[in-house]
Every structure is written in structure tokens, then in C-alpha cells.
Image (cartoon, rainbow, N blue to C red):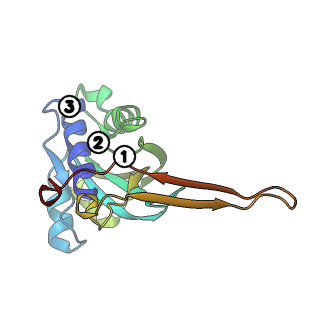
Amino acid sequence: MIVETENALIARINALFEHQLRHVGTHPGDWSEEALHTMLLTPPAVYVVWLGAGAGRTRQRMESRWVLYVVADVINGVDVSRLGLYQIVGRLISGISGFQPGDTGVMQFTESRNLYTEKQGGVGVSLYGLYFTCEEMIEPQTDLGSLDDFLRHWQTFQQPNGTPVCEAHITLPQQETPNER
């Protein structure tokens, strides 16, 4: 579920920019000097990261939090006739908001942040985070195909005092097994 969503987001970003970005992919996984250095040397770029999840609105669902890290060496590309931070951020917000990556809910934009540090300032690039959420299914651990068919369903309904008990006894159709023929 998480990997499929990440892959769908990367594919969507690639479709939105059609080779205008130097790099679109997964964040290296840590904030080491080497990872940060690699990110800052590849503008314009977008890195996709799953930040975690909280409880969903219903059982077997979770509310996933995603961030798109945007690295650019120009704030407003209109001034220099190329893709800048404002253009990348604008296209990502409009192109990812409402996008449904696979079997998830739609992506919802929650906020953007300037992640400026002295390190990136010294390199001459900007780093922004665009934060989104989407609801995802929690995959069941039981293979439903491994369960036997239910042959009978029994249910008793308790109604308010004075109301007769309602019983539902339903026999489902049974398939013949080779031994019964």
C-alpha cells in the first residue's frame, strides 16, 4: 500500500513535468550530510517521502501523511525563463491535490514550508516541503480465499420490550464434494 502510493506519486510527478526536472524519486532515507548534499546538488528536483500515518475514519484504514521535498536553484523561474520554485510548487499543488494514487483516497494538500538552512543557503538553492494526506486501506493479514464457506447464518435480534424476538436462520446453498456423489 505505501510502496504503491509512492510509485503512483512519482509517476504522477513525472507526468506533470515531462522531463523538466533533473530528479524525481524517493528521498534517500536519512538526513546525513551526504544525503542532503546529494539533494541540494540536483535542482530542480522533487523527492517523495511517507511521513507516517494516523488512525483513519473507519476500521482498517489509516490517514497517511506524505511530503514532497522540492529543491530549486531559482525562486521565480519566470524572471529567467526556466522552471523555478514557484512554478514547481504551483504545478505540484494543483496536480497532486485531488489525485487518487491507486486504491487510496484522494490526496489532500495540508501545508507548505520553507525548509531553509544555512547549508542550502550556502549552495544557492531553496528547499520546500509540500505536505499532503490521503486515506489508505490497511491490508488484511488473513487470506480470505483460505476461509471455508459459511453454511449457516444464525442471528437473533433483540427488539424493545414487548416485541417478539426475530430470528434469522439462513441456510446457504452447499456445493457437492466429490465424496458425496
Determine contact: label 2, label 1, CB under 8 Å: yes
Q: Kindly indicate the quadrant of the structure image that contains residue 156.
A: bottom right
Provide the residue designation for mark 1: 104
Provide the residue designation for mark 2: 102
Tell me residue 167's x, y (percent): 63, 56
Provide the residue designation for mark 3: 15
Observer-side mark, 3 or 2, equals 2
Element at label 1: loop
Which dot marks residue 140? none
Tell which of 180 and 10 is nearer to you: 180
The disc labelled 3 sits on which kind of residue? Answer: Ala
- For the N terminus, give its image quadrant: bottom left
Tell which of 4 and 96 is nearer to you: 4
Instruction: Give me the C-alpha separation between circle 2 and circle 1.
Output: 6 Å
Q: Residue at x 22, y 57 (%)?
A: 123
Element at label 2: loop
Tell which of 169 and 107 is nearer to you: 169
From the viewer's perspective, tell me whether residue 14 is left or right of residue 168: left
Above/below status of 73 relative to 180: above
Instruction: Give me the C-alpha separation between circle 3 and circle 2.
Output: 15 Å
From the viewer's perspective, tell me whether residue 95 is left or right of residue 82: right
Closer to the chain start, of discs 3 and 2, is: 3
Tell me residue 13's x, y (percent): 24, 38
Above/below status of 83 relative to 35: above
Residue 35 appears in the figure: yes
Closer to the chain start, of discs 3 and 1, is: 3
Q: Kindly indicate the quadrant of the structure image that contains residue 86.
A: top left
Looking at the image, which residue sits at the far right? Answer: 162
Tell me residue 145's x, y (percent): 24, 58
